[in-house]
Amino acid sequence: MSHSELFLHSTEPALEQSRQTLWRNLKRVLFALLIALLVYGVILVIVGVQLVAHLYDGQDALFEARGAALELQFSETRTDLERAHEAFSAADSRARWLLPVTFLPFVGGAVDHSRELIVSSVDIIESFGELLELGEDLLQLSGLSTEYLEDVQAGLEPSVTFDDLSSNTKKAILERFEASAGDLELLVQRMGIAEEELALLESDAFLAPVASVTRSLHTNLVQTKSYLKSLALAATILPQLSGLESEKTHLLLFLNNDEMRPGGGFIGTYGILKMLSGDIRSLETVDVYALDDAVADDVTKSAPSPLQDYNATSQWFFRDSNWSPDFATSSVWSIERFLAEVSVLSAEQQELIPSSTRIDTVIGFTPTYAASLLEIIGDVTVSGQTFTPENVAALLEYQVELGYASQGVPAEQRKEILADLVNEVKTALFRLPISQWGEVVDASSKALLNKQLALYSTDQALEDIFTSTLWGGRILPETVDVQLVVDANLASLKTDPEVQRTIAYELGRNQEGIWVGRTTIRYEHTGSFDWRTTRYRTYTRLYTPLGTELLRVQGAMNDDLLNDPSGTAGAADVFEELGLSTFGAFISIEPGSIGELVFEYVLSDEVVAAIEAEGYELTVFKQMGARDHALTLDLDFDKNVSHADPAEGSSQWGDDTYSLNTILDQDLMFRVDF
């Protein structure tokens, strides 16, 4: 086949024109696609901004719901929860718009994790909703309206108090509250799961644009879970303590920590509280000597040896019964001594002295806890005396020791002012605005943690709860090493506030290569002789792991300088108590002086094994009722410390010693890894 010479020339323009047309069409398509992508990108940006905005709106609504719930404003709480649910639902809807582009770098992770955040938030809302139903049920049972609660919240003096509710109403509330215990426990578990999820999301780089949302939600959830956990415990405990099924009798121990005793403070006053279905059937308080003196000739049980040796007390009276630092053990002894003494009272004496043939619960508390309640309810005036958080302990002590005489009050009635004060405080607590109920819970929780308040129940199931929640003041070590210093003020008046203590614990190898420990208790007496202060006489016990062997004691005294001017050195008692090796010694410190009691000992085999292994743990228990003392640790492990909790200061890292100065305001745990 042949072509003319013009063939190529005739086809080239056509091909060029075709290519140009194709390129123009391609450019149009690319331009249209670019415009579409830009438009879609703008839409995605808008959607992303809306997503973030809805997340913030949901967060704000949740916070407002929590605040309204704490104020018992349930209608407002429900409205806020609905707003929160709508906001998070809208956020989820916006997140779905982003699903087609999840293949893009960072976008997919951000979308997936945002939806996880939304799911966790919805779980929180549902948990709040179930809690709200309980609140509304209790409100309905109480017969109070939301409008009434809002008026009280706004500052209107409440016309209805807890005491005003009928017995049937109180019982119905307690029954509903008790029935909710299981559901509340499930809510705590659900919130625990949500808390773990939020903790993971909080540090997620994909959620940086809403980092404040995840942080705030996590912090808020932790606080809410804590409140809910307390509520679940209350639903289990309060109905029992309130005598829902049968009358309950509580022994109240007023533990004066101005005169320290092993179980929290001297029992100068006690009370008997009887409750049935939420009603206080009776509340009586009395000077402990009214009971002890009435049966003095009938008490045959011998007092612990230190009480006999340093307190001139041969009989073991109820007032001295809290001799153990373990509150449960002390409570058992207190119940035993109390029931033994009331059993020999005559019928006439039982009419005058508060008594009972059974005790269900022991509640011990110090003036420190009482002062925290006065901070909430305000000053209380009784018999012309105004008690404040700052003066309640000292003024009460003055009134029952000196003030009563100048007011013409008979000696046997000198502590009636305390009974009047207790009743006034009870009335003020029941009349608190709802907005302050949480403050009472917080003050009580803090007192339980700081061991200024403790509970014991003769019902083992309830006692197990007190133990597991650390409300029972128990000494139950779970670590290999243990330290517990216990003071017993013996014939020293109310001197404890004037004595500053520092506890120091050291361990390491001695020159023979033996692992030894040293505990030093330093007492600085800053007071002077007056009607409530004298030389400080204490029988001090140190509790250590079983198997610890005492080497020597320094600073122990045979008696104080008044009774033994030569200052004869005393010996240490060695015995086993609470499953621990225990050393006890007496020391006396004159006003304006400093005294030190030093125990040196060989560490137990278990402690040595832990040190020579990879990890060492220590619990330093705080004595029930004790003020906050300085604590110093200087632990030389003879090998490099790789990690410690709590950590030392950074300047002390990288050596073989764990050194720490802290405050013993509660039971403390320490862990050191090598």
Image (cartoon, rainbow, N blue to C red):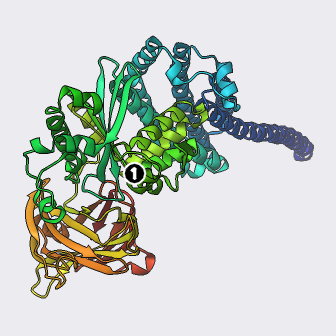
Amino acid type of the residue that numbered disc 1 sits on in the rendered structure: Val
Q: Quadrant of the N terminus?
A: top right
Q: Residue furthest bottom?
A: 511
Q: How many marks?
A: 1
Residue 120 in view, yes or no: no
| Residue 601 x %, y % | 13, 74
Q: Nearer the viewer, residue 302 or 374?
A: 302
Residue 102's place in the image compared with 161, above or below, is below
Q: In the picture provided, is 457 more to the left or to the right than 284?
A: left
Quadrant of residue 557 within the rendered picture? bottom left
Residue 506's place in the image compared with 414, above or below, is below
**Residue under numbered circle 1:** 400
Q: Nearer the viewer, residue 634 or 81?
A: 634
Q: Residue furthest top?
A: 168
Question: Residue drawn 33% across and 22% down?
Answer: 243
Q: Secondary structure at mark 1?
A: helix
Q: In the picture provided, is 502 more to the left or to the right than 417?
A: left
Quadrant of residue 413 within the rendered picture? top left
Residue 552 in view, yes or no: yes
| Residue 444 x %, y % | 44, 43
| Residue 663 x %, y % | 40, 66
Q: In the picture provided, is 205 more to the left or to the right than 90?
A: left
Q: Quadrant of the C terminus?
A: bottom left
Q: In the picture provided, is 600 more to the left or to the right than 639?
A: left
Q: Nearer the viewer, residue 25 or 620?
A: 620
How many neighbours does mark 1 have within 10 angstroms: few (below 14), some (14-19), or many (20 or more)?
Answer: many
Q: Nearer the viewer, residue 615 or 479?
A: 479
Question: Residue drawn 51% across and 27% down?
Answer: 127
